[in-house]
Amino acid sequence: MTILRTYARLWTDDLDQALPLLEELTGEQPHLRLAFHQVALAAIGNFLVIAGPADDLDALQATLASAGATITTPATGGPTGRFLYARHADGAEVEYVEWTPELVRDILHA
């Protein structure tokens, strides 16, 4: 198996607002852009820019259950906020984090 590309993930509230700066910094246009449920994604250079609604673990659990996922670690509090672990129907193991309002402000809106 060959890894073709890795991405630094960036989260934003507005994909269209985030892309112009990345286009200028990388000198590239997005080579991938798609929507998946309520999330919009764009890949540009070595960045994967992800835009979507605010995290809501309570709503997420219902979405995961309807997609056949299994919650392997229930929602628990931690220093970054609430988190849970889930195994998707395809076997992928994913950590979901609902950041504290302070982290959202300091990191996403800085």
Image (cartoon, helix red, strand yellow):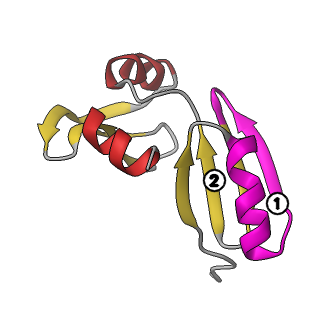
The amino acid type, in three-letter code, at marker 1 is: Pro
Confirm whether residue 38 shows in the render: yes
**Looking at the picture, how far across and down is residue 93, in whole percent?**
38, 49
Marking on residue 52? none
Q: Residue at x 41, y 30 (%)?
A: 55
Q: Residue at x 53, y 27 (%)?
A: 53
Q: Are marks 2 and 1 in contact (CB under 8 Å)?
A: no
Q: Report how far apart the C-alphas of labels 2 and 1 lie in the structure.
A: 10 Å
Between 22 and 11, the one lying in front of the other is: 22
Q: Residue at x 47, y 26 (%)?
A: 68
Above or below 72: residue 23: below
Label 1: which secondary element: loop
**Looking at the picture, how far across and down is residue 61, in whole percent?**
36, 22
Marking on residue 49? 2
The amino acid type, in three-letter code, at marker 2 is: Val
Which residue is the site of mark 1?
30
The mark tally for this picture is: 2
Answer with the quarter of the image where residue 25 lies. bottom right
Answer with the quarter of the image where residue 78 lies. top left
